[in-house]
């Protein structure tokens, strides 16, 4: 079945450091890929997405590129802030025509940013 | 303008009791989900309904019973609560058919504590 693997956390950085959170996936067909962010005490919210190979999703300074050849969707940010401290989830989803209704999430990576 | 709302936000109850969690979405989506998030932030999908029809029913004890009176509402009833049911339960919605990107919108969560 489909799966998503994320690097284990926590990832601890100082403010203004460069961030990379690795995500690789296994899936048949052509999934869409997502990064969700969960701030403390809140639900998940969509951070960015990419729907086909070589697409780059971006939002709030975060970027991720859909790499079909390496089945990866790594999350990057050039300069993190304390307010970026959260749990980040990589996920994939195929359309209804893809034969699977089940969204697949990684286990989440906690990011802690110190001032 | 809450997109996905859940009630209650906190639920503290004793073992053996029966409780319900309610969810409503005003996004016009055709599909709703229940997830369970454990203390390590692992997100497990439990159920999903598309236009009131059950389409995902993962390995969940039959003490858990979802009900969807219409496509904007999805409730979760739990019988004979156990200590292991303590978790945060998230409701989510998305467009399954005809949606371009299939991202999900999450509610704020219901923290269930069983004592």
Image (tube, grey):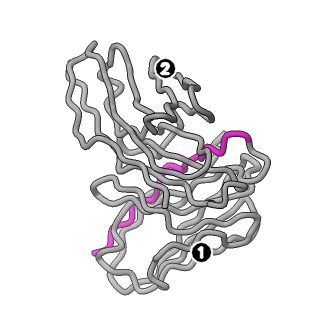
- Residue wearing tag 1: B66
Residue A110 rendering spot, x and y as whole percentages: 29, 39
Does B112 lie within the magenta span? Answer: yes
Q: Image quadrant of residue B33?
A: bottom right
- Residue wearing tag 2: A60
Residue drawn at x 43%, y 62% as measured from the top left: B44
Residue drawn at x 36%, y 47% as measured from the top left: A5
Residues drawn in magenta: B100-115
The alpha-carbon separation of the residues under discs 2 and 1 comes to: 36 Å
Q: Nearer the viewer, residue B77 or A101?
A: A101
Question: Is the same chain shared between marks 2 and 1?
Answer: no
In the image, residue B102 above or below residue B115: above
Q: Residue furthest front?
A: A69
Q: Image quadrant of residue B53?
A: bottom right
Does B93 lie within the magenta span? Answer: no
Q: Nearer the viewer, residue A87 or A76?
A: A76
Closer to the eye: label 2 or 1: 2
């Amino acid at each position: 079945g489909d799966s998503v693997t994320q690097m284990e956390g926590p990832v601890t950085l100082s403010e203004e450091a460069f961030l990379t959170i690795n995500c690789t996936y296994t899936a048949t067909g052509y999934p869409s890929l997502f990064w969700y962010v969960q701030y403390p005490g809140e639900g998940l919210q969509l951070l960015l997405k990419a729907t086909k190979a070589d697409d780059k999703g971006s939002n709030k300074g975060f970027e991720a590129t859909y790499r079909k050849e390496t089945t990866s969707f790594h999350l990057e940010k050039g300069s993190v802030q304390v307010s970026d401290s959260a749990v980040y989830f990589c996920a994939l989803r195929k359309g209804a025509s893809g034969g699977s209704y089940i969204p697949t999430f990684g286990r989440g990576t906690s990011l802690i940013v110190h001032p | 303008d809450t997109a996905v709302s859940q009630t209650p936000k906190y639920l503290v109850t004793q073992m053996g009791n029966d409780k319900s969690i309610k969810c409503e979405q005003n996004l016009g989506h055709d599909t709703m989900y229940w997830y369970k998030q454990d203390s390590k932030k692992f997100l497990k999908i439990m159920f999903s309904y598309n236009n009131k029809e059950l389409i995902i029913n993962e390995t969940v004890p039959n003490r858990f019973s979802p009900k969807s009176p219409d496509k904007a509402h999805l409730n979760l009833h739990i019988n004979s609560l156990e200590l292991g049911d303590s978790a945060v339960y998230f409701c989510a919605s998305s467009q399954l058919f005809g949606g371009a990107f299939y991202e999900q919108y999450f509610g704020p969560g219901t923290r269930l504590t069983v004592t």
